[in-house]
Amino acid sequence: MRQIRYTQALNEALHEEMERDPSVMQLGEDIGPYGGVWEIHRGLLSKFGPMRVRQTPISECGFIGLAVGAAMSGLRPVVEIMYIDFITTAMDQVINQAAKLPLMSGGAVKVPLVIRGEQGSGTREAAQHSQNLESWFVHTPGLKVVMPSTPYDAKGLLKSAIRDDEPVMFLEHRLLYGEKGEVPEGEYVVPIGEGIVRREGKDLTVVSTSYFLLKVLEAAQTLEAEGIDVEVIDPRTLMPLDINLIVNSVQKTGKLLVVQEATVVASMGAEIVRQVVETAFDALQATPRVIGNAHVPMPYSPVLEDTCMPSRGDLLETIRQMAVGTRSKRIVS
Amino acid sequence: MVTIREFEELTRRLYKEHVIQGALHLYIGEEATAVGACAALRPDDYILSTHRGHGHCIAKGGDLKKMLAELAGRRTGYCRGRGGSMHLFAPDIGLMGGNGIVGGGIPLALGVAYAVRYNETDQVVVCFFSDGASNQGTWHESMNMAALWNLPLIFLCENNQYAATTPVADTLCVPDVARRAAGYGMPGEVVDGMDVEAVREATARAVSRARLGEGPSLIECVTFRYEAHCMVLADHRKRPKGETERWQGHDPIDLLEKRLLNDKQATSEEIASLRQSVLDKLQEAEFFARESEFPDPEEFRAEHERGNWQCVR
């Protein structure tokens, strides 16, 4: 099968959905002649024109609000946020408007809106360009939250998100943009709400999404040589969460580790542990754990950023300790 | 202006060597706005900067060593390596911070100006922002409150013709940002942002109003960013042919140099020697930054007790 980049997979999804449905439109900064700073909008303006590919001023609150209003009026806007950090300037429109209008209107209006953009740490861009905000959106009733980790899922899930009648937060990772993967030529979709077992194993269940999933898979590969057999689950969608897939795995392995890039306090990882503990407590043979970024605004200096994120070594060590069933080493500083 | 230009050239080199990492936004071409504006200020006046803020820091009297060390992520930097290029903070020289969020610093400037009024001093605040930021709600809200409460705030727009890759004609509903001042009942003025003296004079008028308690002003400096939005984009290569060259023909440093020579205020030898002294200072700063230690991760963890470090490893 052909291999394409994550960004190209997204670009194809946008082209195909705009061809399929005339109500699909794009909004965002720099998405016109330049094709978006991440080049995900290449070729859209020349094919579909400025009414459907609307390059905006730097007015996130305004154009996300515009997208909500347009979605209420029958359009299917797809909005790009250049860095997820910038969505904070538009949170009223996301949280109080987009997420709430379908219920408050008693179903009189729908908000078929996709807000997509990249997030992530590890690129030395300091505190205002390094956040992972998925847990904020999961915490808000009324939003779906999707976090694809492969080009195949990026394309298939974006198509599903565009066809969905509810607002969807579609969270990418800028370090995934250059990753290549198999994507078939023809039409397909990946349904929202279905996780996938990326690797089967019997000793430990590791749940991870987005860029960190690649690190987890690499760690699982390395540990195979040591006789540690890790099962890796990629939920792909965080809301709604495919909790059954995770619970079934934990019932098999008896151990749960969530690996995420987001800061850990009150996060998705904490939520997954809560749900597993509440539904499958008896299956647990060890304390479930979450590892992720430290609870600090991300510092710029490379040595400091690295100390705030789990390293490859941290990941290997945590899995080893959990796999043999001893309580993990704790560094309390 | 020469210091800023050469500083930026140095950061470009250090970025290629990975001494500076992450986001780096060059100010080349826009030097006259920072220098002209800060020349009209007292040392105890405040400025608020942007993601493209090296020029502002230098113009306000920033220490080149501490700046470069910050950009290199060293513990000797202005923010001990925590902030980096977009987030230079130096309250000792009146720099109340750069900002990674377009328009994010504008309400902060409003707050600094409020504190000045609160403390009943005659300091003023200059808020640097771009044509792009003038389309953020924060800008409009702050313009209204600054005028409403008569705050000593100068909104200093650096209209560099592009918001990232998008030309200003595609983002502004009026030809000049300065026209918007009328809607908020404050004076708005367009000046040649490549002419450092014009910027200084316009800022001096606004400063004088603000010190006398006559309220805020808006100054739009028409300037140009010669380089890409940041180091990982190549938008400057996709501009209309000849556009950058046309602006380079009106270069702020050349303009001042010619004026100084014509008016016999300086000789070419003096200018050459000034340039050399700038290069010497930058060499010292580079040496300082390269030789400085990185911050200590252990110390950082100890400083942040609520970091939940047991979840990192």
Image (tube, coloured by chain):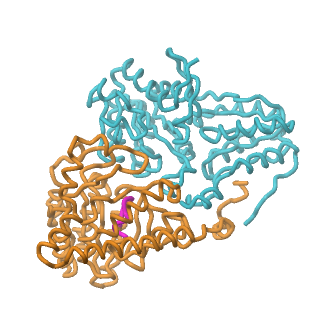
Chain colours: A cyan, B orange
Relative to B116, is A209 above or below? above
Quarter holding the N terminus of chain A is top right
Q: Is residue B255 visible?
A: yes
From the viewer's perspective, tell me whether residue A1 is left or right of residue B63.
Answer: right
Tell me where residue A206 appears, x and y as whole percent.
73, 38
As rendered, which of A147 and B128 lies closer to the eye? B128
Residue at left 87%, top 49%?
Answer: A326
The one of B309 and A123 positioned closer to us in this rendering: A123
Instruction: Identify the residue at the far top of this view.
Output: A186
Q: Is residue B142 left or right of residue B255?
A: right
Q: Is residue B52 magenta?
A: yes
**Residue A192 visible in the picture:** no
> Hey, which residue is sitting farthest front in the picture?
B269
Quadrant for residue B165, please give it.
Answer: top left
Q: Please tell me which residue lies in front, A11 or B30.
A: B30
Which residue lies most toward the left here? Answer: B263
Residue visible at 84% across and 45% down in the picture = A286
Q: Relative to A111, is B219 on the left or the right? A: left
Residue B54 point in image, percent of width and height: 38, 65
Say which residue appears at 48% left-offset and 72% top-offset: B78
Front in this rendered view, residue B74 or A78: B74
> What range is drawn magenta here?
B49-57
